[in-house]
Every structure is written in C-alpha cells, then in structure tokens.
Amino acid sequence: MDSGHVDVAPGELPPDIQRYHYDFNLTTREARSSLYFDVAPPGGDCITLDAPDNVTDIRWNTGQPVSVQPASGTLRVCGEPLFAGQVLLEGGITVPEQTYDFSPVGFTRTRDHAGNTFSYLLNWVEQCDRFGPCNDDPGQLARYVLEVTHADGEVTLCPGKRTRVNSTKTRCELLQTPAPTYSSFAVASNRAWSRNQWLDVDGTKLVFFEVPGGRLAASLSKSVMAGYVRWIKGLLGPLPYGEELRIAGAPTQWLGVEHPANIILREDLPDLPPREYADMTRHTLMHEIVHQWAGNRTTLADAYDFAWKEAIAEYLTYVYEVRNWPADAARTRAYWDRLARTAFYHPRPTDRPTPFLSYAMETYGTGSMLFFVQLEDLLPGGQDTIVQAIKEFLSGSPGTRGVADLQAELERASGRDLDAYFNAWVYGAGETDWPTFTVNTTQQNGELRVEVTQKTFFSGKIYPVSVVIQVKGPTQTVNVPVSFGLQPTEATTSATVPFGEPVVSVAVDPENRVVSWNQSNGLQSLEAPPQRWLF
C-alpha cells in the first residue's frame, strides 16, 4: 500500500491565476497563453475561465486534459486531479485584427501621422478573454511575463521590466508588484519610434518613444513635470513598477492609456483645442501617471467601481493645477461640471448599466465632482482632508478597492458620517436626477438674507450640499455659501450676510463646484453634453 497516496475528489478549482506567460507574434497574431494557478487542499480537477471560442492545443500540466468544454465566453478544462500544488494551463489562439464594442480594445494596425504602422494589442476592463484564456475579474491581480516576437528592428513596448532579447524578440516582466489584467495585457509597437530619455527626477526616468516630428515631449516643460513627479511620489510613494516610466506617442482614439511602467498617449494631444483642459498634453500625462498607483497597483473591486480610479487620477491632477495654475484648474472644474450635470448614470450605479463604455465615459465628471470637489466645502479641512483620505485609500499592500472603501477612508479622515451623502449623490439606479436650486433674497437693516430651495424632477431627494450664491449690487459682489449640511431634512435653507445696496443679479454656483441644474444661470435640462474622452 502506498502510504503517501492521497485520494482527490473531483471538484471545481477557483480561477485564482497567480501568473500569466503570454507569447505573442506581432506579424502572424499567433498567441500562446500559459496560466499558473495554485491549488489548495482538498484540491480538485476542473477550472472554468473566461476565454474566446477558438482556443486550441490546450494542455494541463503539459499533458492532454481529461476534458475541454467550451461555452459562450467560457472554457471549462478538467485534468489530472491535484490535492495541492500548482497547475499550468496552456492554450493557443490567433488574435483577430479587430476591435470590440465601439472601442479601440482589441488588436489593431494603424498609421501614425508620419505614415508608419503602429501595432497595438489593447485590453480593458473585463476584456482579457479577447486574447486567450484568463480570469477577467477586474479585481484579480497577477504577475506577468510577455514575450513578443516582431519584425527585425521593430521597437516594441509592453508592461513591466523591458528587455530586448534580440532584434526580433522583446520580453517584459511584471514579477514584483502584481497588476490587473485590464492594463497588463498590452503590446505596442512602431518601427519608427526613437527612444528619448527625456527627464531624470531623482532617479525616476521619463523616457519618450516618438516618431520623427512627434511633439509630445517638445510640448511639455521639464521643470513642470519634474515638480509634479516629486509631488506625486511624495504623496503616493515610489513608482510601483520600477523607476523607468516609458511614454509613447501613437495614433490612438483614447487620449491616453495606463499600462504598468508604460503610458500610451494620443500623438496629436498638442494639437487638440484646449476646450476641456487648458493644457491637454500636460493634464493627460499627469492623469496617467497617477494611474500607476490608482488603477494598476490598487485596482477595482468590481467593474462598476470604475469611477474611483478615474476620479482620483483627475482629482490629484486638478489639485496640482489648483496649487500652480488656478485658472487652469477652474477650466478643469468647469468641464467636469458639464460632464456631470449631463450624465445619465450615477458614479456607482446599482443597476449595472450597459453598454459599460457609455457609463465609463461619464465618470470623469461625476466621480471627480461628487467624490471630491463637492465634499471640499462640506468636510473639515476641505481639500487637505480629501487628499489625505486618497493617500490612505491607495496605501498598504497592492489590492482591490471599491467605492465603499473610498467612502470609509473619507469618513476616517474627516470624522464625518457620509452615508446620506453617498446614498444621495453616488449610488443609484436609472437616470440621474440632480437638484435645481432656486434663490430668494430679502434685505433689512443692511443685511441680506439668501434663501435657497432645492428640488428634483422625480426622485424627491434632498441632497447634502453646500452651494455658493453670487449676489451682485451696483458696486459690489458677494459670494454667499449656503449649506444644507451632510444630513439635510429640509429642502430650504438660508444664510445672512452684510450687504448694503440693492440686489441687481443672483447666480448659482459661479465657480462650478456643485452638480445641479442652475436655473438662476439660465441652464436648460436639454443642455448638450460636452466632448467625452476616455483616458
């Protein structure tokens, strides 16, 4: 009798993938995925993964599997039972040259502004199964090795530590700090890219890859970016994926994409009209740098927690603008306000709306305004309290966070209960129903009483909020903060200030700090939404 033998009952193994090894040929589009996952007692013999329909040559610990059951969007593979240890699951696929769901996600070959071919394998939230078997749960952190075979002399980028093995092979390793699938399945390549070690900030290197005539690096100030890198590292710590951050210009649809240790920027950012942000290139790059921590090192607990990662990247960029270029920050805030008040979805929707892309494009406004800007005027310490809460939210070991975790950190930092605020502004199903404010003023004995009433179209909510009313007289202007508090019970409140002349005009929220339909400013509920960008 074999005393070391352990009988293993058949059973389903959790898809807890520890490491991916992804081999990809840029020319033929042939890929091979190798997935390593740990097995804990009492073990099992089957695993179900997200996968495309055309996976071939499947192996279980290098041997033939016992059974393979493809279904719509999934692949169930069973092999030799294992009580404890590690399983290596392998499969091949030819990646289609196509994109999905009205997005650039997929594999594409496009021409840059100089006519060179730019090749891009781009993943996103819950989309890794476009490229092979995987666990597309956005909260699943793993480690990666990418081996890319390419044409002789091709300049190829991928996440993590990059090694040019030879003239036709590039290897990238993400073996230290784990990362999510949404940003780590990525390969970008352009034969005409030239490497430019543009900036060294106390050992952190910003390296640009642009084709001749590229204008991204040339449009940026080295002293400005050095100051920003020092500030953001002082707040959030060392870059999580190494001290070399590669930044490449490309003909992309999105303004930018954050991959671990890599950022892809839209090559024509310097030429875009500064309608949304005062400096499109600077703002986008600063935003993407924040994502190395917010989105990559700390990632989403659920796809519909998407708003917090974009809100943090936007808000920390905005905070730096406030402290260095106040007029630019005001333009950023005005853009967010327009995005938010024309949004259909709450930043953390409870009904999981589709298509996901439409929801995601709104979060840059709703998340930034509702998680942070509005709370500056309701929490003790204002902006400093919120920045501290963000720092704590992103600290600790790499892992997943949800909107509820962000609320908890804001409550810890401020000492305030934010349930009523988040239930009113952040969570919700169906179409948003932001408040409208109406204002009534009365004067007596040199004092002005400003009474504000909020109402909604259909929800009947009373929103926790502090709104500024700007009152103008013949010779003076006064901004009057009117607060409903964090747990309002009445839809009308007021404030009284000294004001010794007739009221000529009244405006609601002149600095775009509150999401509302500001009737006093003549806004209509059918206002056209602004340009919506993903980055």
Image: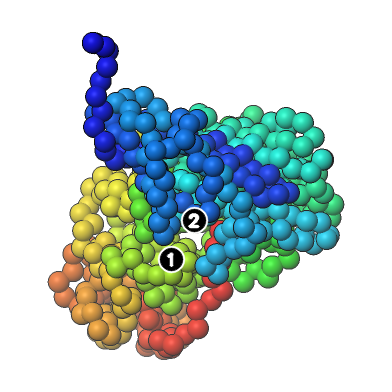
Residue at the spot 73% in from the left edge and 65% down from the top edge: 271
Residue at the spot 23% in from the left edge and 64% down from the top edge: 423
State which quadrant residue 13 falls in: top left
The Cα–Cα distance between marks 2 and 1, rounded to whole angstroms, is: 22 Å
Residue at the spot 76% in from the left edge and 49% down from the top edge: 190
Image quadrant in which the N terminus is located: top left
Residue holding disc 2: 53
Residue 136 percent coordinates (x, y): 43, 50
Residue holding disc 1: 356
Q: Which residue is the extreme one toward the front?
A: 1
10 Å crowding of disc 1: few (<14), some (14-19), many (20+):
some
Residue 291 percent coordinates (x, y): 51, 47
Q: Nearer the viewer, residue 505 or 57?
A: 57
Q: Is residue 141 left or right of residue 324?
A: left
10 Å crowding of disc 2: few (<14), some (14-19), many (20+):
some
Amino acid at the residue labelled 1: Phe
Q: Nearer the viewer, residue 510 or 457?
A: 457
